[in-house]
Amino acid sequence: MAERVLDGRWMAGLVRISEAPPAGMIALHAVQDEALAAALERLGLRLPEPGGIFGGPSGETGWMGPRELLVVCQPPRAAVLLPALKAELAGRPSLAADVSEAHVGLRLDGVRAGEVLAKLVPLELLDGTPPPGSFVQSRLGPHAAALRFDAQGATVYCGRPAAAHAFELLAAAARAGGEIG
Amino acid sequence: MRGGRRVSCRLPEGGRRIDRSRRLDFTFDGRALKGFEGDTLASALIGSGMAAIGRSSRDGAARGVLGTGRGEAEIGLSVAGADGLALPGASLAMPLQQGMGVTGPDAGRPDLVRALSFLFGSSSAGGRRDDGTVPVRPKSSLADGVPSEILHYFADILVVGGGIAGLQAAVAAGAAGAKVLLLERAPRFGGRAPADGVRLDGVPAGDWIATACAQLERMANVRLRPGCEAVRIGAQGLVFAQETAAGDGGDCRRLWKIGARQVILATGGTELPLCFPGNGVPGVMLASAVRDLLFNHAVTPGRRVAVSLCNDGGYRTALALHRAGVAVACIADLRGEAQGPLAAEAAAAGLRVAPGMAITGIRGRRRVKAARIGAADGDGKDGSWIACDAVAVSGGWAPEAELLLQAGGTLWWDESRAMFRPDPEALPAAADGTVWLRPAGQAAGHAGSAEVLRDAALAAAGAVAALGLVLPDRIALPAAPEEEEGPAEGRWLLPSGASPALLRSAIFDFGRDLSVADLPTLGRGPCRASGIGGAELDAEALARGVPLIRSRTGLADWAEALLPDDALPARPVLRTPLHGWHAAHGAAWEEAGPWLRPESFPRGADSGRAALLREAGAARQGAALADVSPVGKLLVAGPDAGRFLDMAYAGSLGTLPPGFCRYALACGENGAVLSGGMVARIDEQTWLCHASPATSARFEAHLRRLLEQRWPGWQVFAADIVGQFAQIALAGPGSRAVLAELAGEIELSDAALPVMHWRDRQLCGIPVRLFRYALAGGLGYEIAVAPSRAPELWHMLAAAGAVPCGTAALRALRIGRGFAGIGRAAALGAAPQDLGLGRAVSPRKADYIGKAAHGLPAMADPSRPQLAGLLTPDGAVLPEGSVAAADGARVMASCWSPVRGRGIALGLVPGGARRSGELLDFDAPDGRVLQARITGPVFHAAEEARADG
């Protein structure tokens, strides 16, 4: 069971910021074609469209790039899915690796998530966030980060070593009085 | 006495910005003064009768407020908030706050207060205490202690400046459906038009402005941002603006990074002053500033004001003063004949107009006492003195073009208007020729509200068309009077017949407080932040005698640091999974690039050296435990991964069997070391590449570039998994015994886990990947473990007798073995062969990146800089970065050796260790000169071999 990196720390300002529950994550590098879609389908996953994260019975699949996907699932499922993925993709050029502990998810809950993120992410977020189900690769301040948006707010996935600093950055951006207006 | 006789004051009524029911207390040099809510610092000081509030940095002469605009008003005052702490970015244009403390240059130590300048105010902001030191606001809780933040924004059309031109352009652009951002540096929109008494559509300009703002606010695609100032144009369409935002524990500064497809500069103009002897005396102000103070704050700089002008606009000030009940001593109009409706109005009001005359001298040092009215083309000795306590001057208007110049636009000299104005034929354009930035209105050199509004509409139409949008027909221009003013006469050095000696004291460059006497240095003085076009323009302005009042440019230092998106903060922000354990066990920290790592674990009152001795001793005689989690971990997989790594690394990796690992170096095309680390073959198609923390980010980018650009067809995938594992090094002759305690049944013998092999194992039920390596014959392991299990494993290893060890001991032992560290070697451009690592280069491989360079004859030159040991005769530590001037030998790595009990150093020395015994003089970065003798690069090996045996 993954240890909580932030020790249960959270803050409430323009949005509520907390560590997302631990998730199983698998980095899946492979050419995205129909064969891959079929392989994912057999495992209860879906091949997402660019910029999206698609849910299936086994977990969600986020688009990280033309040859890269991120599978997000319940923590125990990763240990089952990884060998299954490798078996499905045997003979195809691919790389599948458990990265459950490499990334930490930070939750931003609240309608002002876009406003807070606009201070740290070089994307057009101030005048409205992307629709729920969007999954974007970008930066959070100096750190590489992936962002997913949903109806309640957003989740930022960043590298585990950067998680404490990312939390500080988000907390400062979300401080009361920091509204853009 | 400071400020002289306090004559200027607040008028009994008027002032559209101030709320007379709300008085604010503030102090100037300790003197209690009062202002009103809505005052600026300038209006509050002048309203309180303060004239001399600054000093010339050049000769110490008293200086007052020249204008109310931002640029020229920066006279280096220190401003503190009610809490006594310096306010960031203080300027005279900032709003007055209750309890503000303003400190002028006469308080505090005289040598410190000379730091005053008219230049960029933020550099001189900072409240001084009585002793002259500057109390700095304590680090805010905002990230990195910098009370500042960034905001990213994107717009189709960015309109800079919210005067009537900017509003008109924004209305048009907004109606066309573009996403518009309108920035205005003042707290309110409208610019100068209301103070100038302009009427639009038959109503006062203020009403038209309110209507336009209301219209814009109704548009969902338009964002209005008052109080936000565009200060820098980076690249095409990248504009930086700054504003103040609320932070906890004080105001915070916010930098907007705006990506704009089209930019309209409606930044208005700057009034030019006149250059005459004494024009720097406090009380001499720009006519427009006098008018603004009167209109907005009901403040006058004097009770009897003389006016000197070369254009019709200055008459507005005289009339406004007259209407407000302030005596106008005289209006000196250097033009031979005063015509135009405004001059006629002044004459009708009974004001004394002196055509062909100018103010040619000032009496008074700390404030104006009298002005000499003489012939504008005289020699400066004629005319008569008239009593007055303030002077309003107007030398006409110049477009505010700093942002245009930054964007690559140019100015041309318009003789008929006597101004430098933007060249419409040379506007900043994209590669395909599409213009992306347009000046509009007064910023484009237009005058009169009708002309300004027409030009703004044109600029908006141009921007809208460039975006492929269509301007709706119903955008109407307000009816405005044509040509309210007659032409100005471009003459600024007054009187024009004066001898150079007489003009010496006239201020010419108000931005840098330079007088006519300083003219030869103009254009070569301290550069302004953007420097673009500056020197050339200065030279031409000088030739034409146009005074310089270029407004503040560029960004304050605080914002510069925020410009790159991915700039890591100056403090380390990355933490290893064992951070909590280190912190709980009293680690002394080291800032290793972005990582915070334990340097050592001092016990009690341990000195650093005692900890180093203990930790290094454990690594040599017992077992030491070190957190090496920051090491880069890149998984490379695919059918072509083997041949890819064979190209990327100098060593052979494609033939490495699964279960093996090998120390490998990667070089650049020039043969210099890029990165290095242990590479493990995981399975048939997968390799795990470790890289030293200092080089891992750059190395990963290098590998990705190779895959994308050089061998795009190769089937190789790379995944950065640095955070997935904590990495623990276990080293020393006792390490196998420590591991055995945790391993239970697991075989650790040389047969089961040979040197340079790895195995996936379980230690007390914790899954680990165990690497066994050998460096200089020593016994060592690296253990990769899930971050969540790392503290548990670390704890058990420590309990089994391994001594936690910090980076200092690791480093000392590494240097002692003759390894300088890949990061340092890479920084100095050394090839593997220069570092005694030639064995990491595979000569049998047909090709690898850097092979060509390694084959060059220069590589075989025995006099190349190569690795050598360096020992100071007295045992002192030779500072890293020291250079021997004689032959260019450089110190790469240096430390105090716990083994040798003295300083040891590794250097790149021409000829290398072959020159053993020679003494070299090294210049240390701290200025000392130290001697060191060249030796072999291995300091510890002999003892270690014994320990291992």
Image (spheres, coloured by chain):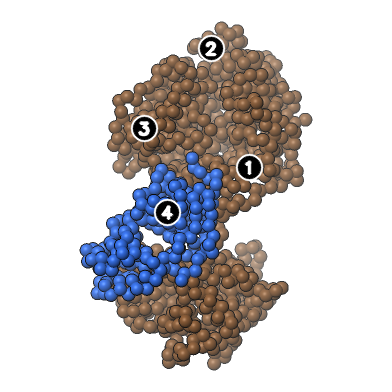
Chain colours: A blue, B brown
What residue sits 46% from the left and 54% below the top?
A: A108
Sequence-first disc among 1 and 2: 1
Q: Determine whether B924 is above or below B534 in the image.
A: below
Tell me the SS state at disc 3.
helix
Q: Which residue is mark 4?
A: A154
Q: CA distance from mark 4 to mark 1?
A: 35 Å
Amino acid at dot 4: Ala
Sequence-first disc among 3 and 1: 1
Q: Tell me if B279 is positioned left or right of B535 in this view.
A: right
Would you say residue B113 is visible in this rendering?
yes
Tell me the number on the disc at residue A24.
Answer: none
Observer-nearest of B664 and B42: B42
The residue sitting at the right extreme is B1
Amino acid at dot 3: Ala
What residue sits 23% from the left and 66% below the top?
A: A38
Q: Tell me if B749 is positioned left or right of B134 in this view.
A: left
Would you say residue B834 is visible in this rendering?
no
Q: Which residue is mark 2?
A: B343
Q: Chain of mark 1?
A: B
Q: Which of the two marks, 1 or 2, is nearer to us in this view? A: 1
Q: Which residue is mark 1?
A: B87
What residue sits 59% from the left and 43% below the top?
A: B251
